[in-house]
Structure formats: C-alpha cells, structure tokens
Image (cartoon, rainbow, N blue to C red):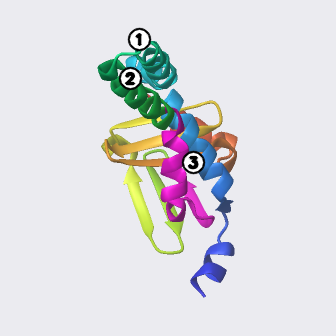
Amino acid sequence: MEEVALSQMENSKILDRATRIRMFILEYYLGGKLWIRIFRFIGGPLMIFLGWQLYNLRDRFEIGYGGFCIVYGLYYILKPIFWVLLRLSSFKTTPVSIEVTEDKLKLRDSISNSEVLFSGMKSVLKRKTYYVFEISPAQRIHLPLNFFSQEQQSSIDKWVK
C-alpha cells in the first residue's frame, strides 16, 4: 500500500540498482580529496608493480613480500567491486519522491520520510551526472541530476560548495 501511495506522488522516481552502483563507483574513484583520488587510481597498479619487482629478486624474503604486494594490489583494484557484491542489498531499486524548496530537500521512500535543511548539510556537490548531499562524513545521499527539474537544480545549485 505504501508503494502505491508513493508511486502516485507528484515527483516520484525510480532509483534503480544500476544507477546506484554507477554513482557509488564514480564517487569512489572521483570523489574526495585529490590525493585520495590519485592513490585510488595508481595505488593498486603501483603495488602490483612493486610486488613484481620484489618477487623477481628471488630471495625468500622478497618473494613473500612481493607475493603479498601483488595480492594486495589486486584486492585494491577490485575493492569497489567486492564492496558492491558484498553489500548488494544496499543498492536495491527503490521508488523515491523528491521535493526541493529554497532551503530544504524532502525525500520519501518506501520506509522513510526525511526533510533536510541545506544549511545543515556539510556540503552539496554537483558531479557530472548526479548530486551528492553530504549530511555528515558517514552519511551521504546520491541522486541523479535527471531526477530534478531545471528550477529545482537552480535551487540546489545555490548551495553547491
């Protein structure tokens, strides 16, 4: 019954699993501080390269550390994929209703109803295809740009930091 009521709301959209995963992967590699982004791009390949160099020295000590570096480098490259696969229930397709005013964002899904003031957010970021509403360092809301009208985007853009 709640889903029927939600689907009949004026600004109801479907946030599908593929979109949620895409936003997570993009935010993992392109979000955050510059040094974190650089390390996420080159960290895994660099560990594999260094591990290979150690492995080729043919000393028992270097072979062990080289093998560890290679395995850890592979893990570091594949970490976002593991994260998604192990937390697949976090990326469910869900209907969401959005309302934007000059000073707040109202969200409603099948289990919650939230109203967040833009002034209370740590930051609002506009990426190429989505917004990131950072409530706290551990709590972020990712919503695609196509969920918002031009008027709503203008209201949100005033808060982009």
Residue at mark 3 to residue at mark 1: CA–CA distance:
49 Å
Q: Nearer the viewer, mark 3 or mark 2?
A: 2
Quadrant for residue 17, please give it. Answer: bottom right
Residue at mark 3 to residue at mark 2: CA–CA distance:
46 Å
Which residue occupies 51% across, 42% down? 80
Could you tell which of marks 2 and 1 lies nearer the N-terminus? 1
Tags 2 and 1 in contact by the CB under 8 Å rule? Answer: yes
Residue 92: percent from left, percent from top: 58, 64
For residue 7, side relative to residue 73 (left or right): right
**What is the secondary structure assignment of the residue under circle 1?**
loop
Residue 40: percent from left, percent from top: 46, 26
Instruction: Let me know if residue 123 appears in the view.
Output: yes
Q: In the picture shown, does residue 81 fall above or below 114? A: above
Which residue extends farthest bottom?
1
Q: Nearer the viewer, residue 25 or 154?
A: 25
Residue 9: percent from left, percent from top: 65, 71
Could you tell which of marks 3 and 1 lies nearer the N-terminus? 1
The amino acid sitting under disc 2 is: Ile
- Which residue position holds label 2? 63
How crowded pointer 2 is (Cα within 10 Å; few <14, some 14-19, many 20+) is rated as some
Q: In the picture shown, does residue 97 fall above or below 127? A: below
Instruction: Let me know if residue 152 appears in the view.
Output: no
Q: Nearer the viewer, residue 154 or 70?
A: 70
Q: From which residue to which does the magenta span run?
A: 77-101
- Which residue position holds label 1? 57
- Which residue position holds label 3? 143
How crowded pointer 1 is (Cα within 10 Å; few <14, some 14-19, many 20+) is rated as few
Q: Nearer the viewer, residue 151 or 115?
A: 115
Q: In the picture shown, does residue 36 fall above or below 23? A: above
